[in-house]
Amino acid sequence: MSSSSINLSSYLNGFGSQSFNDELNLKRPQIELINQADAGLRKIDESFSLLEKQPANAQILEMIASHQQQLILSIVGNINSEFAIAQMLAQGIESLGHQLEVLQGWTNGGLGMFENAMAEIFEAMKANGANSGYALEDLFQLAIMDFMSHGYGSDMDAIMRHFLESTGSGSHGYHEHWDGNKFSTNCKNLFEYMMQNAPEGSLCQSILNYMNNDCGGVDSLIDQFKNNFNEQGGFVCDTDYSDENGLSPMLRLALMSAYLSEHPNVEQSTIILFLTGSIGELNNFVTENTNFAGAMDFLFKNDGYQDDPANDGWRAVSQGGHMVIDWEGTGLGADYFKEIYSKFPPRELTDEEVKEVQNISDQIKMMQETLKYWLSVIRDGQLSIARNI
């Protein structure tokens, strides 16, 4: 054991009182737990030594914060310590860990960033009171995206991919005979299937509950598909598609993925624009920052299939008197969707975010010193109890 750990034998030899020895034996599990926590803090110190050799790393810091919090909880759950102090420490570490988790979720890419993006769209829609019209389709599509990206069930995958391709704001189409009537007759079974199979607390479950509680449930969705599918708000490539209109969640994330693949050095405000901005705002951003004519032009020519002679990927085709969004193939491509959510492109930390990570690193180091002091106080308290018997 280290000098900071407690050698039980030396204490037993140093005191002749049987009552002391008996009490110390009773305290043995608690003292050993403190020693284990002390060893845990030394391991955390080793992690800090790694950080001194490189810029602050959000992933390492998040791991350290998690380890610190687990250490506190192990003590609080087994020793009658200063609970109020322990709770404050735990809450402080949890807050720092959450800040790091958010930063990582928006910069690491992959499913984590895809999840954050979907959640951001949902929260923005709720904040805007979205509960009718094309917003119903966007909400339902978002639930499908969460359901499929987490593999909660595959029995209705083929149907789901039609909803991903041809529903939602601006994304309507008539491919493979899927029109408003066919979507309306299929959405109830799909709604119920997801309700039954999406885990409690999942984004999918939260969206469907919101639709049930605030949007009139699946009946309102059926009416939307049946009565409004052919209206101008459904076709982003039509010349009369209003700049004020939005874009389906699937098209938003497809566009953002394509843009980040080419331009990873963007600020968080740009990410939010992709997820919540109107089509007019998205078009303006693309024309100001690229050589493309607008958001859809950028997507069509940067979807990963622009150089594939066998597959056009996203494109616009003329159907039913509209220019409609189409993914070449039957429904949205399964491989393409998997590629989107599993390999969603990361973005680089901005200079301000690098400073924020460094600031969090300093706070976690201070928390480490506070934990060491708190642990020594608890250790002294346990021995004091034994000595005073």
Image (cartoon, grey):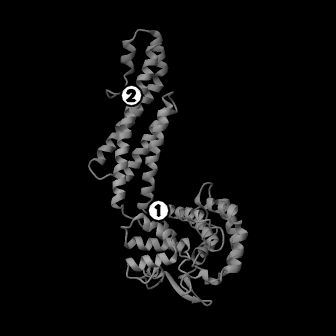
**Residue 326 seen in the figure:** yes
The mark found on residue 113 in the picture is: 1
Residue identifier under label 2: 376
Question: Image height check: is 29 above or below 91?
Answer: above
Q: Earlier in the sequence, mark 1 or mark 2?
A: 1
Spot occupied by residue 144 in the image (x, y as percentages of width and height):
60, 67
Assess disc 1: are there few (<14), some (14-19) or many (≥20) residues with their C-alpha within 10 Å of its C-alpha: many
Residue 166, picture quadrant: bottom right
Task: Indicate the quadrant containing the N terminus: top left, top right, bottom left or bottom right.
Answer: top left
Q: CA distance from mark 1 to mark 2?
A: 40 Å
Residue occupying the point 36% across, 40% down: 366
Q: Amino acid at mark 1?
A: Met
Spot occupied by residue 301 in the image (x, y as percentages of width and height):
43, 82
Spot occupied by residue 193 in the image (x, y as percentages of width and height):
68, 64
Question: Image height check: is 293 above or below 185?
Answer: below
Quick one: SS at disc 1? helix
Residue occupying the point 48% across, 29% down: 82
The mark found on residue 302 in the picture is: none
Question: Image height check: is 300 above or below 219?
Answer: below
